[in-house]
Image (tube, rainbow, N blue to C red):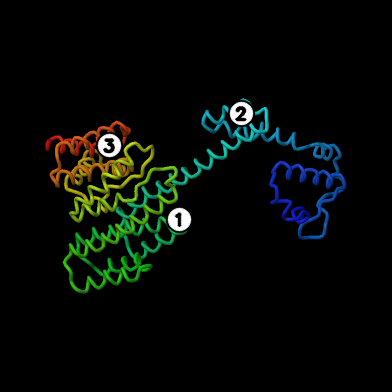
């Protein structure tokens, strides 16, 4: 009921949390003195006369803005400051003026807003890491596909786009191995039901009895469109705290099509953007994605499984960063396009930088970089 005793402007105009809290505590003091606290829904008093406590009411009435501000500073804000970087926490060594205090508190708020966004990106990245193995290791059905899409959409609409892309790559892999089937058509209908024209295009191509490779390419193209859209959505929302390029999958698709010049251009731009970035996304090398790469990468990932069969369950063992993928594509395209020794020498310098910046546990990244480094050196 107390909230309705004040006009809306009292709560929102000239917002001052300390002032509002002080006035509410004074109101509570009056209610304790009068042993009067009206129930919000029922016409009755919540305070019995035996609950009257003049001492507590007096303490509440004595609280002013200076006292409450000091209490909040010592018991809350200083505690929060200890969780911040040192350059922020040290600001509270001297808050002798209101300006200094305001600057210190503003730094906490600014830092927390930035870290909150970064925490959200880490949650998105974690989901991005978990979705491909779930699709790859379990046989996807039309029913499970609908379940995944519904549940992921409830969490974040971006995951719907990403899952659709992975599921399409899963279908492409199944088609390349076993041919098209009614079950796969059902899965495609569920994935593409939001894009009827795209599904009808795939279905019409099936009815014209295209060969398997053409069908696979058609489904892969749709997958890459979804992946690029997903990258754009993530970059839009988290690009201020994480360096994200949106054309890594576009470059990979260009490589798969044999458009090495386009792939080289995109990959080179991506390397220049990502090489010294503090945080970058990763790309899985599970079967759904590795079908797009050369045999040497397939062999490399297979060898890691032979050496350590449990590596399949460790994300760090089946992920490579956008930097590694871009350097791999860049080097491969330079070799296929017979670029000069000078051009390859520059790429080797980029590879050296990437190797130094990677932690030791990024085994697949380091092995991939070593592989392309040796291929470039042999050519030189």
Within the image, what quadrant is residue 258 found in? Answer: bottom left
Element carrying mark 2: helix
Q: Who's the residue at 24% across and 60% down the image?
A: 172
Position of 42 with respect to 358 (left or right) is right
Q: Which residue is mark 3?
A: 363
- The one nearer the camera, 91 or 355, is 91
| Mark 1 and mark 2: Cα distance apart in space | 38 Å
Image point (14%, 40%), residue name: 340
Residue under label 2? 92
Look at discs 1 and 2 and give the one toward the viewer.
2
Quadrant in which the N terminus is drawn: bottom right
**Cα–Cα span, label 1 and label 3:** 31 Å
Classify residue 331 by image quadrant: top left
Asked whether 160 or 258 is in front, the reply is 258
For mark 1, what is the residue?
156
Which of the marked residues, 1 or 2, is nearer the chain's N terminus?
2
Say if 316 sits above or below 188 in the image: above
Q: Indicate whether 210 appears above or below 331.
A: below
- Is 184 left, or right, of 26 in this rendering? left
Q: Which percent across, then down, holds residue 9?
A: 72, 53
Query: How far across and down, in percent of the image, does residue 298 sit?
Result: 20, 46
State the residue at coordinates (22%, 61%). 217
């Amino acid at each position: 009921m107390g909230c309705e005793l004040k006009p809306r402007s009292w709560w929102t105009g000239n917002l001052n949390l300390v002032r509002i809290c002080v006035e509410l505590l004074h109101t509570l003091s009056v209610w304790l003195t009068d042993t009067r606290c009206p129930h919000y829904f029922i016409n009755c008093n919540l305070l019995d006369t035996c609950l009257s406590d003049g001492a507590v009411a007096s303490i509440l009435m004595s609280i002013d803005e200076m006292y409450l501000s000091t209490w909040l500073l010592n018991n809350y804000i200083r505690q929060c400051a200890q969780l911040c970087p040192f350059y922020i926490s040290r600001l509270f060594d001297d808050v002798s003026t209101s300006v200094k205090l305001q600057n210190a508190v503003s730094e906490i708020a600014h830092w927390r807003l930035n870290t909150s966004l970064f925490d959200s990106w880490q949650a998105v990245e974690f989901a991005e890491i978990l979705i491909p193995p779930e699709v790859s290791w379990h046989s996807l059905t039309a029913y499970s596909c609908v379940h995944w899409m519904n549940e992921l959409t409830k969490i974040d609409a971006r995951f719907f786009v990403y899952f659709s892309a992975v599921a399409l790559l899963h279908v492409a892999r199944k088609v390349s191995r076993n041919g098209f089937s009614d079950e796969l058509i059902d899965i495609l209908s569920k994935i593409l039901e939001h894009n009827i024209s795209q599904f009808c295009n795939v279905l019409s191509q099936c009815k014209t009895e295209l060969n398997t490779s053409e069908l696979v390419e058609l489904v892969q193209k749709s997958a890459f469109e979804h992946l690029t859209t997903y990258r754009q959505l993530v970059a839009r929302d988290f690009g201020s705290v994480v360096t994200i390029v949106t054309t890594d999958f576009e470059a990979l698709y260009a490589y798969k099509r044999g458009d090495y010049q386009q792939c080289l251009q995109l990959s080179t731009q991506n390397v220049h953007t990502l090489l010294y970035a503090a945080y970058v996304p990763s790309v899985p090398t599970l079967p759904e994605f590795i079908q797009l790469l050369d045999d040497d990468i397939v062999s490399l990932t297979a060898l890691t499984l032979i050496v350590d069969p449990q590596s399949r369950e460790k994300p760090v063992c089946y992920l490579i960063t956008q930097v590694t993928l871009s350097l791999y594509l860049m080097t491969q395209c330079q070799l296929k396009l017979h670029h000069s020794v000078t051009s390859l020498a520059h790429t080797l310098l980029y590879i050296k930088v990437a190797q130094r910046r990677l932690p030791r546990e990024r085994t697949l990244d380091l092995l991939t970089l070593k592989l392309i480094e040796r291929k470039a050196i042999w050519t030189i």
